[in-house]
Amino acid sequence: MTRIEVAIELDATPERVWEIVEPVERHVDWMADAVEIRFDTDQTRGVGTSFQCDTKVGPIRLTDHMEITEWEPQRSMGVRHTGIVTGSGVFTLEPLDLGRRTRFTWSEELRFPWFLGGRLGEAVGGRIVMRAIWRRNLRELQRLVDAPATV
């Protein structure tokens, strides 16, 4: 299992960051590797929400099955991966500067199957490729957070 973590400091309150992160179906707006999200449950928010995310990294395409395991508005959102790639992850929002800014951390522990390189795939694909993609995703999240809020 490999651990991947990226973080960014955003010039926005945790409430503003949560407005962008909370709608799971909109993660495709800021995650380059997420192509489409389909819910398995009528529930689309909170612990117990289950969904499939079509993922594309270079030539590799797979469907990632996930379930929300942690949900604290403006604080954290955790998931369990139960598909081809297994493991768990969490988005953490930490208030900075008396709540005027936010440190957003994305942390995952993932296990890749043998046909995606197993431990070697985890080391190369996870630590190098996925970290680079997620850093780019966080820059896109920053762009959305910085955009004027829509009503």
Image (cartoon, rainbow, N blue to C red):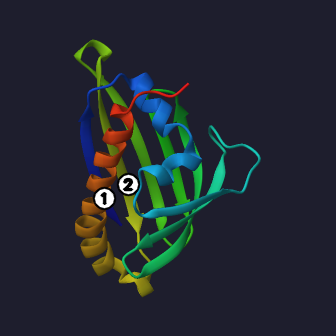
Q: Are marks 1 and 2 in contact (CB under 8 Å)?
A: yes
Q: Is residue 34 above or below residue 56?
A: above
> In this image, 104 relative to 128: left or right?
right
Q: Amino acid at mark 2?
A: Glu
Residue 102: horizontal and vertical position, in percent?
30, 27
Q: What element does badge 2 sit on?
A: strand
Q: Would you name the residue on which mark 1 appears? A: 3
Q: Please tell me which residue is depicted at 46% across the width and 31% down the height of the picture.
A: 18
Number of disc labels: 2
Between residues 60 and 125, which one lies in front from this camera angle? 60
Q: Please tell me which residue is depicted at 57% across the width and 62% down the height of the picture.
A: 36
Q: Please tell me which residue is depicted at 47% across the width and 50% down the height of the picture.
A: 29
Residue 25: horizontal and vertical position, in percent?
58, 49
Q: Would you name the residue on which mark 2 appears? A: 108
- Of the numbered discs 1 and 2, the one sitting upstream in the chain is 1
Q: What element does badge 1 sit on?
A: strand
Q: Is residue 65 above or below residue 75?
A: below
- Which residue is most to the bottom? 115
- Which residue is most to the right? 42
Distance of label 1 from label 2 (alpha carbons)? 6 Å
Within-10-Å neighbours for mark 1: few <14, some 14–19, many 20+: some
